[in-house]
Amino acid sequence: MSRIERRFQALRASGRKALIPYVTAGDPHPDVTVRLMHDLVDAGADILELGVPFSDPIGDGPVIQLACERALKHGVGLRDVLRMVQTFREADQETPVVLMGYMNPIEVMGHAAFAAAAQEAGVDGVLTVDMPPEEMDDLSQQLADAGLDPIFLVAPTTGDARMRLICEHARGFIYYVSLKGVTGSATLDVDAVSARVDHLHAVTGVPVGVGFGIGTPEQAARMSRVADAVVVGSALVRQIEARAEEPEAAVRAVTEMLRSMREAMDAVQAQSA
Amino acid sequence: MSNSEAIKFDQFPNAEGHFGPYGGRFVPETLIAALDELTEAYHRYRNDPDFLAEFDRDCTDFVGRPSPIYLAERWTRKVGGAEIYLKREDLNHTGAHKVNNTIGQALLATRMGKQRVIAETGAGQHGVATATIAARLGLKCVVYMGADDIQRQAPNVYRMRLLGAEVVPVTSGTRTLKDALNEAMRDWVTNVDDTFYIIGTVAGPHPYPMMVRDFQSIIGRESRRQMLERTGELPDALVACVGGGSNAIGLFHPFLDDESVSLYGVEAGGHGIETGEHAAPLCAGKPGVLHGNRTYLMEDANGQIVGTHSISAGLDYPGVGPEHSWLKDIRRANYVSVTDDEALAAFHELTRTEGIIPALESAHALAYASKLAAELGPGKRILVNLSGRGDKDINTVATLEGIEL
């Protein structure tokens, strides 16, 4: 059983939903990323999603684009991100880590070399935004051989047949994109999301996380009623953006925001228990 | 050419959009349904007599096709080798080959019921061509353009605005064409229901490389017929500049089965390949994944896309259409580069010798053609795609020469 599966199993047993923060590795400075990861776990993160900086992040809105640019100014590449995960693992062997990024850095490293290095570093899942399952044959095999979970996006525009295909490939969890748009967009229709998540639950036993556009503790709490996991990215990264020159303050602000989301989600679960 | 003997070029790409290992669809999940819808619509209309008749009518009456081929006699004599013919895409309405494709895609957009079109642009030629057809068809038009390019190409920005388009400056990344493409993709992800994305070159996710190639192939079909009528033979070589590669593939494609015809794609060598300051992924890059397709790219050791340099904004792109990557690997086409200085010299040469001011993009093809003409020698014929006119570039050239207009 993978670390991600174990984590979801434990959450289910305790009647809780997963909170998954996203931060871009190396933002605002590579020196604070590992500590930020630990602090996020302390603040209530169940799984960490670590962004691999890329020069051309077409699936991301302006907030995460700028986070990538800040990290790239420090020259943070895929190998650096893997080193950060390895360092994180020295003190935390339990919290799953998912890398989220784009295809080209993996392409340049080589699929097999990447899968082996990621496994070695202690990565658990890989979400490649611009890699649909149809193109994934080789990478998919390499990830499977290394025991890594391929995480896939399902969008509001994904048709039923395709959704089933994605569910067949997906391991760890499925990431339901809660709106038509890039990360950090504003409009969120909880009822529509709820219907789609129910449908996914009917098709697959793989847990379903929801992300894109979840910006407040209240929204996180509402989403946690319907999904197995709530992913929060741009809202946290905005806290970093506002304090990009003061990494220590940035770490504190992100952590505080995540804690408030955790509390809001736990309050919902306490009510429904 | 032994590698390409058995290849049926008209059967590429395959159903998934692959040209050998290149092409494909590397996009966020939200766009897959839109690409499926587009592929289905394109297959429905690509052989539809009404659609093709409307495309042909616009090409004739609105663009002024067929564009002539022109024997550059004085220039040929000066170079002293093979005869050099020019395919006069510079004479098209809006001044370049770009409009062939924007008409095709805009007609498709109206048939799909999309009332809003978006585009990316570098030098502004594709943006102008898109704004032009959007005005003619009454479509809402938004053009994304790098903030630096907006500074460099002010006349084209104003042209687009005159035509009713909204021009959105892109300030992320390198603030040039690749970032404009990123931003257009983001717009499309967000407004996928009512918006048609008119990509300006043979790159992007399937079906764009195929669809844009098909619309641009009118260049090669006309050229083939015109050269046969004019000379009774096919040319010995074709030369075209390659940024994303749409004018080149449009010229090359109808000749791919003609093994006697050598193909030369000319990339922007910028300050010289050895300086690293260029835009020549086929000559000096490696395969990777960008903007929805696998193709040759300019990237660093971490897989980050690097900034490019060319005197010509239209060639200033770190990727290239996937079909070119494949034609390079199977050695059906040759890819070479010329520097800024060589292109600039050819710009002046053609202007003074033939009375034709070429676009700086096309000047790259001209510069290589003059070398090739000398190499091939008398008795041979070269056809160069003069993909655009140079009016848009006179400010750039004047500035380089220290002249303020």
Image (cartoon, grey):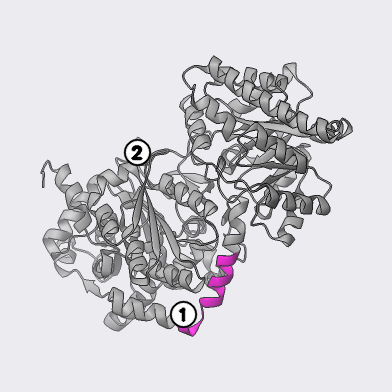
Secondary structure, mark 1, is helix
Secondary structure, mark 2, is loop
Q: Is residue A7 left or right of residue A88?
A: right
The residue to which callout 1 is attached is: B51
Check if residue B151 falls in the magenta segment. Answer: no
Residue extent of the magenta highlight:
B37-50
Whether residue B29 is visible: yes
As drawn, the residue found furthest toward the right would be: A13
Q: Residue B156 location in percent, x, y?
A: 26, 55
Between residue B122 and residue B386, name the one nearer to us. Answer: B122
User: Which residue appears at 47% of the width and 40% of the height?
Assistant: B305
Q: How many marks?
A: 2
User: Which residue appears at 45% of the width and 60% of the height?
Assistant: B202
Between residue B248 and residue B108, name the one nearer to us. Answer: B108
User: Which residue appears at 28% of the width and 53% of the height?
Assistant: B157
User: Which residue appears at 47% of the width and 71% of the height?
Assistant: B108
Of marks 2 and 1, the one in the foreground: 1
B86 versus A153 height, above or below: below
Q: Residue A145 location in percent, x, y?
A: 78, 40
The residue to which callout 2 is attached is: B277
| Three-letter code, disc 1 | Phe
